[in-house]
Image: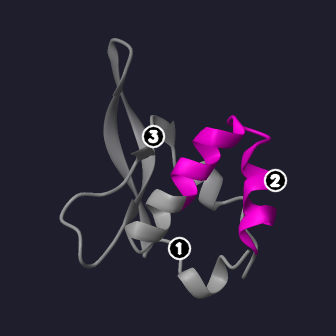
Amino acid sequence: MSFKQVPVIEGTYVIAAKAVTLLDHDEPVVFLDGVRFVPLIEMLRGPMRCGDILQLWTLLVPYQQALRILFASVRLGILCPDAVRW
């Protein structure tokens, strides 16, 4: 996994946004569930439990949305299941 700047449409503008790039995916990931994903990832510090991740992410998004983003990030292989134990 790495980060790179990509163009995204925000309103009526094209702006640069950070994206997660994965070796086994053709397209970079900028948004999950309509939320910019990199700011959420940048909040993490090493291996963390799911509850701790959700507690952090709910500072920025509602709990149910944070939960959907967490599950999607594990499904995509961005977060490792070993690092997101309950």
Q: Main secondary structure of the magenta part?
A: helix
Q: Is residue 56 magenta?
A: yes
Q: Give the residue type at disc 3.
A: Asp
Q: Position of residue 36 (x, y in %)?
A: 51, 42
As helix, strand or loop, the secondary structure at mark 3 comes to: loop
* Labelled disc at residue 55: 2
Residue position for label 3? 33
Quadrant where the C terminus sits is: bottom right
In the current view of this chain or complex, which residue is farthest to the left? Answer: 26
Q: Position of residue 6 (x, y in %)?
A: 33, 47
As helix, strand or loop, the secondary structure at mark 2 comes to: helix
Q: Residue at x 35, y 18 (%)?
A: 13
Residues 69 and 17: in front is: 69
Tell me the distance, in whole angstroms, between the alpha carbons under discs 3 and 1.
16 Å
Residues 12 and 57: in front is: 57
In the current view of this chain or complex, which residue is farthest to the top? Answer: 12
Q: Residues within 10 Å of mark 2 (few under 14, many from 20)?
A: few
Q: Position of residue 61 (x, y in %)?
A: 68, 36
